[in-house]
Amino acid sequence: IKSQKALLAGYESLGQKHAEMSASLSNTCMELQEAVDAKKVLSDTIKTLQEEKFEFVKKIKAMMKEEEHLKSTIKKLEKQKKSTSSKSGKGFFSAMTSLVTGSGGDEEEESKILFLENRVRLLEDQLKRSGVAVMEAPAQ
């Protein structure tokens, strides 16, 4: 009888240990699943950030290219202004007219000049808003 009671107590102890181990294993599995889910979220976030970075770099490069184009245009206009001013005494607008059309000015040419001036101002404003330093045009 004593051995039966001891055997029964041993089975109960084994059953209790089995239940504890089963609960521990279940908790470990849940923690692992949470870690896997968190890793997926982090991977998705990293991928999204990399895509956004790529787009941002593309925009910056385009803005830098536009800035270089504007600088080049300004240099051409300054050179044309110096050339025109020293030769004929004409002003900045005449230099722009000559640069745009290759001749003297009329209403259509003046309209083109105004359009170009406004376009340059808009592009400069855009660059300033984006934080890119813009070389100021010379005073007229």
Image (cartoon, rainbow, N blue to C red):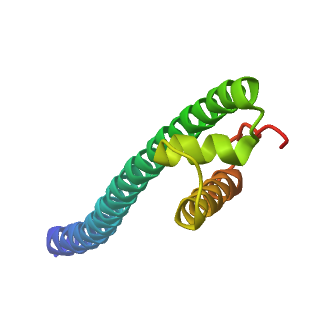
Q: Is residue 127 above or below residue 2?
A: above
Give residue 115's position: percent from left, percent from top. 58, 63
Give residue 125's position: percent from left, percent from top. 69, 58
The residue closer to the viewer here, 65 or 91, is: 91
Give residue 56's position: percent from left, percent from top. 46, 51
Q: Is residue 88 above or below residue 52?
A: above
Residue drawn at point x = 48 percent, y = 48 percent: 101
Q: Quadrant of the C terminus?
A: top right
| Numbered disc total | 0
The residue closer to the viewer here, 14 or 59, is: 59
Residue drawn at point x = 46 percent, y = 51 percent: 59
Res 60 visible = no
The residue closer to the viewer here, 1 or 78, is: 78
Q: Is residue 3 above or below residue 48?
A: below
Residue drawn at point x = 80 percent, y = 37 percent: 138
Which residue is farthest right? 139
**Which quarter of the picture shows residue 48?**
bottom left
Res 96 visible = yes
**70 lies left or right of 9:** right
**45 lies left or right of 73:** left
**39 lies left or right of 116:** left
Residue drawn at point x = 59 percent, y = 54 percent: 105
**4 lies left or right of 104:** left
Give residue 49's position: percent from left, percent from top. 42, 54
The residue closer to the viewer here, 137 or 16, is: 137
Q: Is residue 12 above or below residue 35?
A: below
Q: Quadrant of the N terminus?
A: bottom left
